[in-house]
Image (tube, coloured by chain):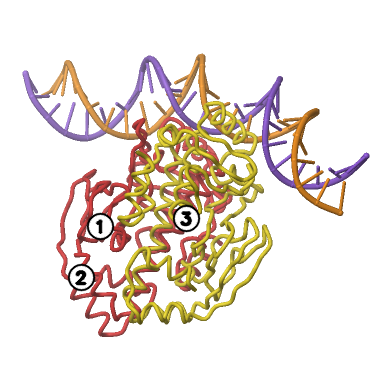
Chain colours: A yellow, B red, C purple, D orange
Amino acid sequence: MTPLLRKLESVIRLDDEERRAVLALPHTIRQVGPHTDVATVGERPAHCCLVLEGWAHRYAYTSAGDRQILSFYIAGDIPDLQHLYLPVMDHSLASLTACTLAFIPHEAMRALVVGRPGVMAALWRDTLVDASVYRERIMTLGRRQSLGRTAHLFCEMYMRQCAVGLADDLSCPLPPTQAELADAVGVTAVHFNRSLRTLRSQRRITLQGGQLTIRDWMGLVAMAEFDPVYLHFNEDRHQSAEKVSA
Amino acid sequence: MTPLLRKLESVIRLDDEERRAVLALPHTIRQVGPHTDVATVGERPAHCCLVLEGWAHRYAYTSAGDRQILSFYIAGDIPDLQHLYLPVMDHSLASLTACTLAFIPHEAMRALVVGRPGVMAALWRDTLVDASVYRERIMTLGRRQSLGRTAHLFCEMYMRQCAVGLADDLSCPLPPTQAELADAVGVTAVHFNRSLRTLRSQRRITLQGGQLTIRDWMGLVAMAEFDPVYLHFNEDRHQSAEKVSA
DNA sequence: CGTCCCTTTGAAATCCATCAACGCAGGTGG
DNA sequence: CCACCTGCGTTGATGGATTTCAAAGGGACG
């Protein structure tokens, strides 16, 4: 549970008792292969899932068979924390790459927050940041076209990985296939590929072998109209975000 | 604070002490005219806002000057509850029609949830339903075209108003202008108007004078692929939702 | 060496945006 | 009372962005 502790403490300082309570959470660790469902739409999960390693994603299909990927999750994320108080899954959750996941019973989580305002605030806040990311995605899908959407996704996934130490200098893993990235930004795989081609020819990024390298951060930020405020990093982190964009 | 109490009790039964605490919340009531900003992007609000009457909305502009409306809020909604734990506004909040709003200091809200797991759960859950609505909007913007998006918005706003007793039999207020509805579903006002024309000619709805009337609920639900699960009504309400769709 | 998945490219069709214009109702001031 | 203005809704014509359909290349892996 150390990753969970790290996540919580990145937002709010916990006292010793709180720290002990988090570390004492019952949990089971599970390795899952790539593209394995963890919870599917309609289910009533009894556990929260914490990503320790690898990428996961939340998705749904329209009746016409088109997939929309609602979000990607990386190490440290708790993709289904919301189901602590929302009994039924409204979409499906699955691994993307091979993953190491920790499962914590809902009961234990609910007991953890009662009487511990600091832990409650940190967890509640986590679900609120999640919602903020969704709002930004709505902006992107509603009002930007393919090139801007693509650039925005790259900026976001780079910054999120920066924040948890998974990115090197202007380079980070990006394991989803083009078809998956396309389903996240709401275009076809064919058209996503064309946008990618444009970004490459403009020398803003390279993307190969699941590794994204940003060659022109300012240019990418500009064409995405990317403003990291919506990620709600805490003060320290926000400053480092500024530094990157400067 | 009776509307807030009603809202909370629609989700979770509160005991007498909790009920008294909610009713004792300090607050100020304010009337605002149509299209009046309540909080703008970048601000650090010190109050939560509860809509008592009228419509409000959350919006942002791209640098090109295109507006995206992220959500509409109706009586009983708490549009900025999230800022209890997310200090800075990531978008702007404004009235749409003339509104009656109640403002409750953040401090009082935070004090309310500490030691009252029932109230905390109800409020947290409210922010989670909000996020679920955002997810559904992402599905709609990413994978449905104009006609489906329009139908989906109509279904959603009708059901949400049903849930709080603001809708008559298959008819409800819909005060936003076509330009505002268009900015919510991510198309131009011109194109929204054309979709509307199609829906009217198919005899699925009528819309005039800010009043929406659904003439073919099943048809509208089908073309929107609307499934109210994402609204996470509680059991009783969910059943009434089923009844409507039957 | 072949197969499968992923990526890439081309051409045609469709959806939607853009530009332009008009009608209509309500309000306002002369 | 009427002329004028403004905001909102509506329609037509054109161009651009994206989808769809189709096909081919490349790399990993059995």
Q: Nearer the viewer, residue B7 or A143?
A: A143
**Which one is in front in this view, the residue at disc 2 or the one at disc 3?**
3
Where is residue A47? Give x, y as percent. 54, 74
Real-space Cα distance between discs 1 and 3? 46 Å
According to the image, label 3 marks what residue?
A: A165
Considering every residue shown, the one lying at the far front of the view is A169
Same subunit: marks 2 and 3: no
Looking at the rendered structure, the kind of residue marked 2 is: Ala
Q: Residue at x 33, y 42 (%)?
A: B60
In-image side of C29 versus A20 (left or right): left
According to the image, label 2 marks what residue?
A: B108
Q: Indicate the quadrant containing the C terminus of chain A: top left, top right, bottom left or bottom right.
A: top left
> In what element is the residue under mark 3?
loop
Where is residue B52? Give x, y as percent. 25, 60
According to the image, label 1 marks what residue?
A: B53
> Relative to residue A214, is residue D10 depicted above or below?
above
> In what element is the residue under mark 1?
strand
Considering every residue shown, the one lying at the far bottom of the view is B16
Where is residue A16? Give x, y as percent. 34, 79
> In what element is the residue under mark 2?
helix
**Which one is in front in this view, the residue at disc 2 or the one at disc 1?**
2
Looking at the rendered structure, the kind of residue marked 1 is: Glu
Real-space Cα distance between discs 2 and 3? 37 Å
* Circle 2 chain: B
Q: Are marks 2 and 1 in contact (CB under 8 Å)?
A: no
Q: Nearer the viewer, residue A242 or A177?
A: A242
Q: Nearer the viewer, residue B206 or A207?
A: A207
* Circle 1 chain: B
Q: How many C-alpha atoms fall within 10 Å of the one at disc 2: few (<14), some, or many (≥20)? A: some
Looking at the rendered structure, the kind of residue marked 3 is: Gly
Real-space Cα distance between discs 2 and 1? 22 Å
Name which of mark 2 and mark 1 comes first in the sequence. Answer: 1
